[in-house]
Image (cartoon, coloured by chain):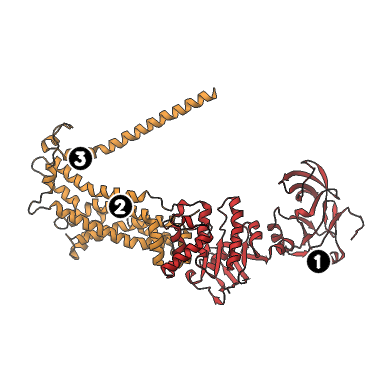
Chain colours: A red, B orange
Amino acid sequence: MTTVSYLEATRTYEGTDVPAVDSLSLDIPDGELLVLVGPSGSGKSTALRMLAGLEPLDAGAIHIGERDVSDVRPRDRDIAMVFQNYALYPQLSVAENMGFALKQHGVPKEERVTRVRETARILDLEPYLDRKPRHLSGGQRQRVAMGRAIVRQPAVYLMDEPLSNLDAKLRVQTRTEVVELQARLGVTTVYVTHDQVEAMTMGHRVAVLKDGILQQCDAPSTLYHQPDNVFVAGFIGSPAMNLVDVGDDRPPRLGEAELALDAATEGKLANGTGSLKLGFRPEALQVGDGPLRARIRTVEDLGSEMFVHVAVEHRGEEVPLISKTAPPFAGAAGDHVGLQITGTTHLFGDDGLRVASPKATLRSPGAVSHS
Amino acid sequence: MSAESTTATVGERRWINGALGGLAWLTALIFFFPVLWMVINSFKSEHDANTAPTLNFDPTLDRYREVTESAGGLLSFGEAFANSMVIVIVSTLIVLALAIPAAYALAVKPVHKWRDILFFFISTKFLPVVASILPIWILARNFQLLNTRLVLIILYTAINLPLAVWMLRSFFAEIPRELIEAAEIDGASLRGQLTSIILPMAAPGIAATALLCVIFAWNEFFYAVQLNPVEGSTVPIWVTTNVSTRGDFLAKLSAASVLACIPVVLAGWIAQKRMIRGLAMGAIK
């Protein structure tokens, strides 16, 4: 049973005042695949390296299981890491690469050979055991890197963007394989990626980081449907959530239309002052008939779904919005259409935090609320 | 029309490339000619060597026999060769033994103000050699090191060390950081990281560095002639002993020079085989 805990772990690089990872607190239960995701510079890789012992802690602590490993050397942490560029030893064969850690830990040769063979079988690497890394394809090298981690049977796997060097198709395929493998081995895994699709599809839970600060750590669907703040709302989901400043109008207005809210939300908004940000997912925006006038900018047809980019007049500016709809869609660029919101909207306060997530629609000003 | 002009351009370019290639060959031959002339002379008799340059002569190995014969009391080739070998090999080994950990520290785990340290290393090369000879000679005399192999071993080690640290540092810095980190996580000790990961990967760089140290130490003349004119003399000094005030010596000197060149040419040839191997092929991506 291996849990991992970050306890207000902080790391500030030399020569800067801003921590790369700022008081990160995170509990990862045994067997979980936790994904750390964020834009570049968010501190996700630093957080992983702190867990690996490659980056010292300036404050706080990290526990693996019951043990405080904050000052423990990497090799004594019982972890295995898969690097973004694989970091295979070029002068060693595949078998030697995979057996390197076992050799360092004094595992007898016979057991070493058996374990390397077994791992190679799982990963379909048996035909390549005698080859040097330079004679392998990118996908094979990636599997060797995975194999080198698996063969050790460590307490925790750390993976630092292990799929980012693969081409798109192989990446999707390998993604599934990694998830299956992790589920079968049941070993606690911390996985870093900048790709929110990878994060959402792989993680049991996803921790979103920005500027070294943990924004939210939840199951993928919770992140999607109940984002804690504007950043998470905008970062998770593709295409991204529509986010529009609606100021302090009550009820909030979008262009010439206003938002019809339920009484509970209206009550909540009546107490809180300050300007609001309105968010709604592309699938909640219907193009066709509606009280909000818009112009179609482009239409993207992906076959199974369509993205309609529209522009609306809002507070004297042209604001781009995006709608996701199932084909067929008749409109074309330049068409003037009406917009309607159907489904959940999110309202974020001045501080970026989510205030409410009411189901709401748009109506023409002065029309009677039907809610 | 445009197709024609393209063809003309390609043809023109080929002509320019050909001309540049010819020029490069010509330059190389001009530079190589003295060496060739020396090698040819070494197979001539003194008479042939001192008359008009000609390729029409009877090749002979007699000059080689003459210069390698040991004459009593004089510095023999065997003696000088042995001195040079010992001094070159020992000083190069010491240089590598000291420079590898130093370069590792500067490249992989940089200490505070490592740039200043690096500059200090190279600054020791700023001083003209002539300016240092007198204090070095006095020190050598006081420590009774004049005319010993040890004094040249110490000097060549000291002279080569800064350059070796610089060179090795840049080779070590090219090793992907992740490889060292992977080895660290895999449980390798500092020594294990060095011996199983860093040194094999930096082998071409180490070979290049060792080669430079060997070449310098083998060819060094100034310190050797000042400090070891009698005992512990090296091959370059032996070459000059073939300059004679009586009679012709051009062919003999050529033969001696060729003999002095062979070891460094061999060393370069061997090291080159290691150097051309890719440094980090297949390590990443």
The amino acid at mark 3 is Val
Q: How far apart are labels 3 and 1 at the CA level?
A: 96 Å
Residue A321: x and y in percent read 76, 50
Task: Report the residue at 40% width, 60% height from top.
Answer: B198
Q: Which residue is mark 2?
A: B211
User: What subunit carries mark 1?
Assistant: A
**Badge 1 is on which residue?**
A272
Residue A13 in sight here: yes
Q: Is A114 located above or below residue B218 in the figure?
A: below
Q: Position of residue A313 (x, y in %)?
A: 80, 48
Instruction: Between label 3 and label 1, give the one nearer the viewer.
Output: 3
Residue B285 percent across, percent down from the top left: 50, 53
Helix, strand or loop at label 3? It is helix
Amino acid at dot 1: Gly
Quadrant of the rendering where the C terminus of chain A is positioned: bottom right
**Measured along the vertical axis of the image, is residue B61 above or below residue B6?**
below
Instruction: Please state if A173 lies on the left or on the right of B197 as rendered.
Output: right
The mark tally for this picture is 3
Q: Residue at x 13, y 42 (%)?
A: B61
* Chain designation of label 2: B
What crowding class fits label 1: few (fewer than 14 Cα within 10 Å), some (14-19), or many (20 or more)?
few
| Label 1 element class | loop
In the rendered image, the vertical position of residue A330 relative to residue B78, given as above or below:
above
Residue B123 appears in the picture as rendered: no
**Is the same chain shared between marks 1 and 2?**
no
Quadrant into which the N terminus of chain A falls: bottom right
Q: Residues within 10 Å of mark 2 (few under 14, many from 20)?
A: many
Q: Which residue is mark 3?
A: B39
- Residue A205 or residue A337, whichever sits in front: A205
Graded by Cα atoms within 10 Å as few (under 14), some (14 to 19) or many (20 or more), the crowding at tag 3 reads: some
Badge 3 and badge 2 in a common chain: yes
Residues tagged 1 and 2 counted as in contact (Cβ below 8 A): no
